[in-house]
Image (cartoon, rainbow, N blue to C red):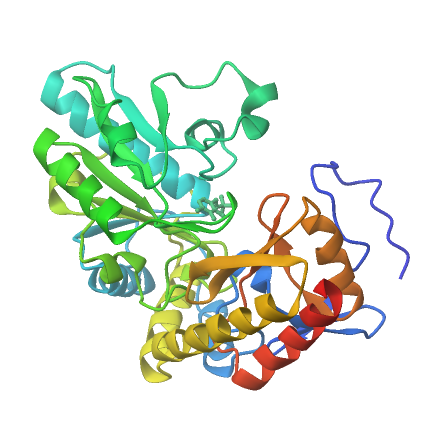
Amino acid sequence: MMLNDEYLIHAYGRHEVAIDHGEGVYLYDTNGKKYLDFYAGIGVNALGYGYQAYNDALHKQLDKVLHVSNYFYTPPLLEASKKVVEATKLDQVFFTNSGAEAIEGALKLARKYYFLKHGKADSEIISFHHSFHGRTTGAVKLTGNAHYQEAFGPLMTGVKYASLNDLESVKALINDHTAAIIVEPVQGEGGVNPCTKAFLQGLRALCDENDLCLILDEVQSGMGRTGSLMTYFQFDIMPDIVCLAKALGCGVPVGAFVANKKYGDAMTPGDHGSTYGGNPFVCAAVSAVFDIYEKDHIVEKAQEAGQYLETKLDELEAKCSHVIGHRGLGLMQGIVIDEPKSGFYVKEALAAGLIVVSAGDDVVRLLPPLIITHQEIDQAMAILEKILK
Ligand SMILES: *Cc1c(COP(=O)(O)O)cnc(C)c1O
């Protein structure tokens, strides 16, 4: 196929590959070449491709109604809201169309709470260096990476950046204007950097002491990827708000911000909205995802596969001179390489039939579908070993 992209705005550096279809954990390009997918559409396709129960649920909803706006209830919306709230152990959910919108909503919720408490709109938010929260102008301001912000100012004010796993750096930024702390339990784009348990528990305590909103961005780390449905279950803390997207819908564009009652109640009709957000089609997908997760033990499988992957990465590190370490949690792993050329290795892997992605210049990131088997992990490792030796 000729790849004629003259009608696209060139905001991406795309691979010279056009994908035709997927099956299981494999993608096939328009030339018929087969790829083992350790990228899963940036961690979206937790169930891989063509998962029967998922496709059936979507077909069924397609024939009923796709969209009605948020001025009506629909059974899929109500069903999905119950499932998301139960899954997160929080109280109330607002559905969005993307991760960035979930972040924007969480931001508005935290600011609204601050406004109701202080009677003025001059709140500050603490975020982290090397974080990633999305590409809308609010989310990009929360993203602690100048590269994403540079050209798009002036951006929102009142955001300060602390250092991950450094509680003192957070404490130093808290003042009377602070409304919220936002953090990824495992930073994704910023290099696959997990928070320590002590750090997240420390953030929770700081938020409790100062009446601040703890927002966890689990857009990438959530939905079983790190070995528990929500990563914060492993850290024995509760956020005030969690942001989800990516694997929440396993392929349909849906996100959510989920809040406890304290913050959820801060919003009243008219404060926020979305034309598509939580329409019956995406909500049917969300419900199907939770049903499948439960019935087919997806999180347990992911946890087990994640442990296997980690042992295999130890072996890879021992065998390959270009690998100087690996870090991550569960099926969210980064291979640290000895030179800033992750892009080169991503291309080499692609040529060899394995899809991976970089996370910064020196990390090759693995985000396989959660249904990945040992055999498929072995297959990926064999390709990576050849490339990284
Ligand atoms: C992908 C991502 C986002 C943004 O999600 P979009 O759906 O691309 O808007 C936000 N936060 C994290 C941690 C992400 O990985």
Q: Which quadrant of the figure has residue 376? A: bottom right
Query: From the viewer's perspective, is 344 left or right of 300?
Result: right
| For residue 260, above or below residue 233 | above
Please tell me whether residue 273 is drawn above or below residue 152 in the rendered image.
Answer: below
Residue at image coords 42%, 53% = 245
Residue at the spot 74% in from the left edge and 48% down from the top edge: 14
Left or right position of 27 against 91: right
Residue 56 as seen in the image, left or right of residue 291? right
The x, y position of residue 42, in whole percent, is: 56, 56
Please give the name of the residue rendered at 75% of the width and 52% of the height, measured from the top-left corner.
344
Residue closer to the observer: 104 or 239: 239
The image shows residue 47 at horizontal and vertical percentages of 49, 73
Q: Is residue 212 above or below residue 74?
A: above
In this orientation, which residue lies closer to the viewer: 239 or 199?
199
How many marks the image carries: the answer is 0
In the rendered image, residue 212, in percent from the top left (x then y), is placed at: 17, 32
- 60 to 317, vertically: above or below: below
Q: Quadrant of residue 10?
A: top right
Q: Is residue 6 visible?
A: yes
The quarter of the picture where the C terminus appears is: bottom right
Q: Quadrant of residue 1?
A: bottom right
Among all residues in the image, which is located at the extreme right? 2
Instruction: Say whether residue 270 is visible.
Output: no
Q: What residue do we see at 41% from left, 19% from top?
A: 156
